[in-house]
Amino acid sequence: MYKKEYVSIEEAMRIGKGKVALRGWVYRERGSSKVKFIVLRDSTDIIQCVFERKKFEKQWGEIDKLQIEASVKISGTIKKDKRAPTNFEIDVDEIEIVGTSENFPINKYQSEEFLLDVRNLAIRSRKLSASLKIRSTVMGALHEYIRSLGYTEVEAPSFSGETSEGGSEVFKFNYFGKTAHLTQSWQFYAENLVSAFEKVYAMAPSFRAEKSKTSRHLTEFWHFEVEAAWADMEEIITVAEGCVQNVIKNVLIKNKKELETLKLNKNRLEKIEIPFPRITYRKAIEKLSEEGYNIKYGDDFGAKEEKRLAEYFNNFVIVTNYPLEILKFYHGEDPKNPGLGMNFNILAPGIGEVIDGSQREPDLNKIIERLKKAKINLGKSDWYLDSRRYGSVPHAGFGLGVERLVQWICNLDNIKNAIPFPRTMTRLTP
Ligand code: 4AD
Ligand code: MG
């Protein structure tokens, strides 16, 4: 017996010869009365393992009964074998069955809905876990990049006595006899925080009671939000572009294997360059109506229109200067174009809006006027305006939907596969 130092499957294949010890789960199994083939899976890869009956007379009964997803420890000799699924094979000397498995409910041919019902098990799939590894890179890269620009991470609560973005898309619940709301955005806090930290960011879940069952809406999504004192729209757009570019760069370096598992073309990522092309809201409306889209000045874009806009440029595209009537009260007004906002949306090809940002309105009286016009009473959120009452400064910020960016990078049909356990109108478990 040799001392067992467990290595990952990836590491074992790098070593490529000699004795190795591995731990993992049965990914596939087949066999005859003389030999059993098990493809073993761990978090890094899969590898074929061969059991010859003559070496395992005592354990054969157990080995023969091994079911998909049973957990095992094995040791044996690794060698190259072109016929094996990952070009390596292990001739097993020893096996310890750690956990047997019941009949695994997932097979090759199952509906998306069923896979969501058993998401806790489906998450073991190589494709889903590849997307989620990319998601982890995206998260890490956003933190890393924004910190490198001198931003401080400052958190805010997830529930509150009042709403931030307002509208009907807010979840309410009973909080010791009072009504509380799940946060839709960190922005109200951010605009106050800039007076203490100047450059701030947060990575947190946002909650939207969206009734829309679309391929790009979740009721809980991870929101990367950034806010900077003294910044104008140009500066914050540059930060947003840098975030996207850095994320893509990191995925290309760190997720070669996952991109392969997902059969994704690296080119699609490599060719994204900053600065992104820009179009004003007015021009975008003109272009779309010329093409026969049923949209006029003053309408907001739907998913269809946003996708088309990004398609024109075959790139991420920045749409700027929406009319104030369709913007929230906090977006600043463009002094050169009264009636238009100093705001932008960044759209991703095939998805649409991924980032929403603006230069904020710093003037207390103007903001109060806008609130009146929109018939909004801030109520308990009146503290938000303190940012304008006590040393207001120009500032700008944006929010990026992490799942939408992951959805684009991984080319996923549905946003649900960009988050481990999606929450939608109809899904609260697992
Ligand atoms: O456009 P939104 O609603 O903007 C805000 O919340 C601002 N307060 C952000 C800010 O300036 N700090 O949301 C920002 C982004 C969207 O562009 C989109 O990517 C994502 O959040 N998002 C969603 N992602 C998944 N499911 C949903 N229901 C989403 N709603 C918004
Ligand atoms: Mg938006």
Image: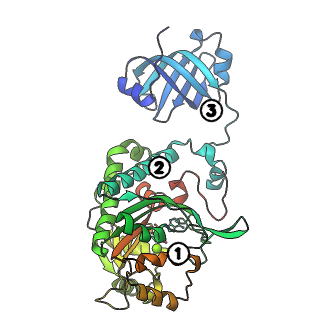
Which of the 4 image quarters holds residue 217? bottom right
- Is the C-beta of the residue carrying label 1 under 8 Å from the nearest atom of ligand 1? yes
Looking at the picture, tell me which residue is in the foreground, 357 or 13. 357
For the residue labelled by badge 2, is the local secondary structure a helix, a strand or a loop? Answer: helix
The amino acid type of the residue labelled 2 equals Ser
Q: Label 2, on which residue? A: 131
Position of residue 306 relative to residue 46, above or below, is below
CB under 8 Å between callouts 2 and 1? no
- Between disc 3 and disc 2, whose residue precedes? 3
Residue plotted at (56% across, 41% down): 124
Residue bearing mark 3: 68
Residue 231 versus residue 335 in the image, above or below: above
Q: Quadrant of residue 257?
A: top left
N-terminal-most mark, 2 or 1 = 2
Q: Please name whichever residue, 367 or 62, is drawn nearer the observer in this view of the structure.
A: 367
Can residue 171 be seen by looking at this rendering?
A: yes
Circles 3 and 2: CB atoms closer than 8 Å: no
Q: Nearer the viewer, residue 247 or 369?
A: 369
Point out residue 32 in the picture as x, y percentages from the top left corner.
62, 21
Q: Is residue 418 left or right of residue 348?
A: right
Q: Which residue is mark 1?
A: 165
**Residue 406 location, x and y as percent?**
44, 56
User: Quick one: label 2, few (<14), some, or many (20+) residues within 10 Å?
Assistant: many
Instruction: Count neighbours of disc 1 (C-alpha within 10 A) and say few if under 14, some if 14 to 19, many if 20 or more.
Output: some
User: Which residue occupies 40% across, 69% down?
Assistant: 398
When the figure is inspected, residue 21 is found, relative to residue 318, above or below; the finding is above
Number of the front mark, 1 or 3: 1
In this figure, which colouring scheme has been used for the structure? rainbow
Real-space Cα separation, disc 1 to disc 3, in angstroms: 47 Å
Helix, strand or loop under label 3: loop
- Mark 2 within 8 Å of ligand 1, using the beta carbon: no
